Image: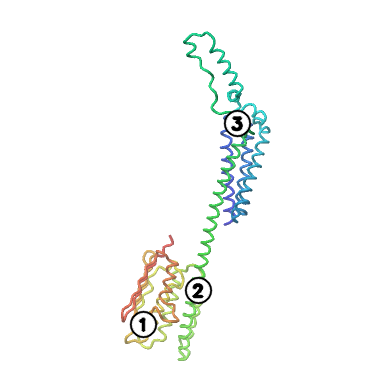
């Protein structure tokens, strides 16, 4: 995925620079020849291209990104001076007005602006007007004869800055600002991606930790049941070993995937219940309905079994006189519904050492199905109830 993204980024940059070239060419082409406008646009594009990427990938990360503010400002100033000199020395090469000619014709290339600003010309006109005031002229003529107006500002002394350098420097500053904005946005995006990667990694580590708590507990119960069968020399021992093998395969291999078909989760629950029946003498008060499900729906593995395990553990179902358990698992329009009710003859379900606990399962649900599940857990003196609804829709 990285290579196509890089190619796409390069394409976007090329399109932007081509569009910028046509934008540069359109304005000057109206005021000068196409050849001069083309050379002017190429020169400006060349300068801005180097300035943008040099500032983005060299000056900003190596100086500003490391808090070397003084060095960065000095470097930017030096770069602007170099490019200003480049503009100055290449004006005549691309067909623009040479520098010495600009000094004589003024900023806009018109002689009259230079003459008006010349104090010598003004004094000559003023002396001429004084001589005319002593001549015999008509009253009407004298009323309409006005002295030449002295310019408001005197001609500036010092070395004049050519418009090419001035405009080039201003446009370069604009490109610098755009490159800084581009770099800041890129840094923010990188920081956000790193934060998301760290968050995902933390979630994966937490999920692995939760699974490491679940799997040994199931294995411990299953081995205890097989041990009980072997002590009694039960003919069901080989069958239960096969079931344990299926459970271990699901825990060790199938549950490593992100999601599994609901049929596999149900099969694991069925095998677990068979293990519980083995150790019960007599007819338990057990009602289980787990077949009315859409087997093709996908679910996170090992998600339902903690509630079922706790129900068997704390209901004391082996006490056929007082223990009881009712469990119904159904699906309707990709919504899974699990309802478990059981007698509460043991200790509090939430705080038993060695078990996964309801709170642990709540953490998994909040991470795996945020805003897509409802969980009710409640208990009275002699009954514990769990009602879980999960929206398994992939959309």
Q: Are marks 2 and 3 in contact (CB under 8 Å)?
A: no
Place of residue 244 in the rendered image (x, y in percent of width and height, measured from the top left):
48, 80
**Label placed on residue 209:** 2
Task: Please state, as top left, top right, bottom left or bottom right, where the C terminus lies in the image.
Answer: bottom left
- Which residue lies at the image location 67% right of the left edge and 32% below the top edge? 92
Q: Earlier in the sequence, mark 2 or mark 3?
A: 3
Q: Nearer the viewer, residue 22 or 333?
A: 22
CA neighbours of label 2 inside 10 A, class few (<14), some (14 to 19), many (20+): few
Residue 358's place in the image compared with 126, above or below, is below
Does 183 sit left or right of 296 as displayed?
Answer: right
Q: Quadrant of residue 150?
A: top right
Q: Earlier in the sequence, mark 1 or mark 2?
A: 2
Q: Nearer the viewer, residue 327 or 136?
A: 136
Quadrant showing the N terminus:
bottom right
Which of the two labelled residues, at mark 1 and mark 3, occupies the earlier sequence position?
3
Q: Residues within 10 Å of mark 1 (few under 14, many from 20)?
A: many
| Numbered disc in front, either 1 or 3 | 3
Considering depth in this image, is 177 or 282 the residue closer to the camera?
177
Q: Can you tell which quarter of the image residue 79 is in?
A: top right
Residue 156, disc: 3
Query: Which residue is under mark 1?
Result: 315
């Amino acid at each position: 995925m990285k290579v196509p993204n890089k190619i796409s980024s390069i394409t976007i940059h090329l399109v932007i620079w081509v569009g910028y070239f046509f934008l540069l060419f359109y304005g000057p082409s109206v005021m000068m020849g196409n050849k001069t406008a083309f050379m002017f646009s190429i020169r400006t594009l060349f300068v801005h291209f180097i300035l943008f990427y040099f500032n983005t990938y060299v000056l900003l990360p190596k100086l500003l990104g490391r808090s070397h503010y003084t060095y960065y400002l000095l470097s930017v100033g030096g770069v602007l001076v170099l490019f200003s000199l480049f503009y100055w020395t290449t004006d005549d090469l691309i067909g623009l007005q040479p520098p010495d000619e600009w000094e004589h014709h003024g900023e806009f290339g018109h002689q009259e602006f230079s003459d008006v600003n010349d104090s010598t010309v003004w004094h000559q006109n003023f002396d001429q007007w004084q001589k005319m005031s002593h001549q015999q002229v008509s009253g009407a003529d004298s009323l309409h004869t006005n002295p030449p107006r002295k310019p408001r500002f005197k001609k500036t002394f010092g070395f004049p800055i050519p418009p090419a350098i001035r405009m080039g420097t201003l446009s370069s500053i604009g490109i610098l600002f755009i490159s800084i904005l581009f770099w800041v946005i890129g840094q923010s995006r990188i920081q956000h991606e790193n934060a998301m990667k760290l968050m995902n990694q933390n979630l994966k580590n937490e999920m692995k930790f939760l699974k490491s708590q679940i799997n040994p507990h199931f294995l411990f119960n299953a081995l205890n049941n097989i041990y009980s069968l072997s002590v009694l020399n039960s003919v069901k021992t080989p069958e239960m070993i096969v079931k344990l093998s299926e459970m271990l395969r699901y825990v060790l291999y199938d549950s490593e995937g992100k999601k599994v078909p609901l049929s596999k989760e149900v099969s694991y629950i069925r095998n677990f219940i068979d293990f519980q029946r083995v150790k019960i003498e007599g007819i338990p008060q057990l009602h289980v309905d787990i077949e009315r499900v859409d087997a093709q729906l996908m679910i996170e593995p090992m998600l339902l079994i903690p509630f079922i395990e706790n129900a068997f553990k704390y209901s004391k179902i082996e006490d056929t006189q007082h223990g009881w358990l009712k469990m119904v698992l159904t699906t309707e329009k990709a919504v899974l519904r699990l309802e478990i009710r059981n007698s509460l003859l043991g200790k509090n379900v939430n705080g038993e050492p060695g078990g996964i606990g309801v709170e642990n399962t709540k953490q998994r649900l909040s991470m795996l199905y945020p805003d897509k599940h409802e969980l009710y857990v409640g208990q009275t003196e002699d009954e514990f109830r769990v009602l879980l609804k999960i929206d398994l829709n992939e959309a």
